[in-house]
Image (spheres, helix red, strand yellow):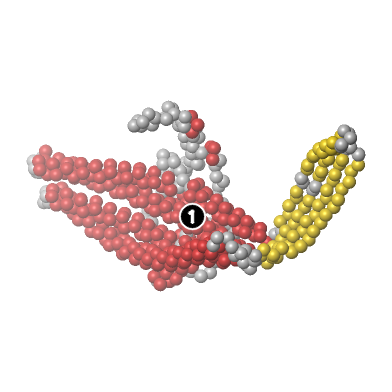
Amino acid sequence: MKFRANRLNTVKLIGIVAGACLPLASFGGLLLDQHLSVSPQPGMVWRSPQPMQIAEPSPPQTTAPMTLAALTDLALRNNPATREAWQAANAQAAALSMAEAGYYPTLDLNVPLTRGRTSINSSSGVSSSSTQTRLSPSISLGYVLFDFGARSASKQAASYGLLAANLSQNRTLQDVVLRVEQAYYQLLGAQQTVVAGEQTLKNVQVSFDVANARRQAGLATVGDVYQAKTLLAQSRLQLRKAQGEASKLKGALCNAAGLPVNAQLELAATDGQMPTQEVRYTIDEYLSKAKQTRPDLGAAEAQARAAHASADAATAQGRPTLALTVNGGKTFNNVQTDGFTNGSSSGTIGINLSVPLFNGFRTTNTVKQAEARAAQLDATRDRVALQVELDVWQAYYDLDTAQAAITSAHALLRSASQAREVAQARYQAGVGNMPDLVSAQASEASARMEVIQAEMAWYASMSQLNYSIGVFSSESESK
């Protein structure tokens, strides 16, 4: 498997830069110190002495109608999950820089300053004292010459860790995109359901008016009126449920985009029936592509390689190291009694060989732990690979089924609409009956729902297939 990732540049795949995190002190505005000082009595429920003031987030409000592309762009810039992934990649980049520090020399400056007083009492009773101030600055340099690959293994582990973080960041971005797309199509379907419900209610209202007029003219029974009235009440109830579901799904879409659930969000109008297209590639081609493009599979592979490199680094910790040491310093003495100052200089250069002999089997057990961790992540990578295949397989055939369902649903709606028109005309002409008309209207309403569900299922399945392959919608048709 080939990986292509630069340090913290993988986010350029979609051309966005996540925003900076809010300061911790400003998040929520929680005045915790005013609530920690009060404790409840035993057996009593704790209640806050005053409500905590939680600041409302203030992401951008949307006023103009939003397309799916605009909503996706907004979510990638505004959803907290993208900032979390970005900062995780930042942390891993810092870890790589820390690992690279082993290739640089260490330089230390020490500046000890001491002051002492000495008193001397002689046998003749004469005493003398002196005060001495000593300043001894020194500088030391150290550089590891050879360590049996410990630095190299640590750097390699950190590099794979950064690659895994970048790929995980990409998968997080794809998670956000999938959530937005799924919520968008669900809301769009719910809004179309409301329109279909309004059309059904309009048709049922016409039937009720006809039945009522025929009843007053003595051409229909009161049972016809009751049946039409029952269907009218059912249609109103279904419309109200559809409106409630649309409101609920609007909140879900706002949440996916990182907006408050009560944000003023309006979807841009679509131009009639949304287009669909045939699936271009075979299932085997999609399976092959997923192995190259799924970020979580690449991240699992990178994590496994990082674990193996960490095991190598742990092994190298138990081996000797050879280091160069250079020290230089100067000592200044000031003796106040005699009023003179003297000093001395010193300098050393050497080679230091350090050989670990025994540390309570710490190194041995560290290596065992690292090797077990590497074996665990190998198994995790294999599990993810199997899950990738299953995800692509299921999404592909869901999309294939949804494509076939669209054709069948439109044929069903055409025949149901024709049957309802015939039944309504027959009833108005006095040669039909109300049960036939009610049944025809119910069938037409059900067929409208089938069309809406089939079309939205196709787009949801297409989004899921792109997500399963590990690409964005604009990349789904490129190999």
- Percent coordinates x, y for residue 371 in the rendering: 50, 66
| Residue occupying the point 68% across, 67% down | 146
Going 35% across and 55% down the picture, which residue do you hit? 456
Relative side of 329 to 373, left or right: right
Q: Position of residue 33 (x, y in %)?
A: 50, 31
Residue 147 picture quarter: bottom right
In the depicted view, which residue is nearer to us: 225 or 267? Answer: 267
Residue 468 visible in the snapshot:
yes
* Left or right position of 334 against 450: right
Residue sitting at x 85%, y 44% = 333
- In the depicted structure, whether residue 44 falls above or below residue 100: above
Picture coordinates of residue 40, whole percent (x, y): 39, 30
Q: Which residue is mark 1?
A: 173
Q: Count of labels shown?
A: 1
Q: Residue furthest front?
A: 123
Relative to the observer, which residue lies in front, 141 or 441?
A: 141
**Location of residue 324 (image quadrant):** bottom right
Return the x and y of residue 406 as percentages of the image width and height: 31, 61
Is residue 5 visible in this depiction of the protein? Answer: no
Q: In the picture provided, is 124 more to the left or to the right than 142?
A: right
Q: Amino acid at mark 1?
A: Leu
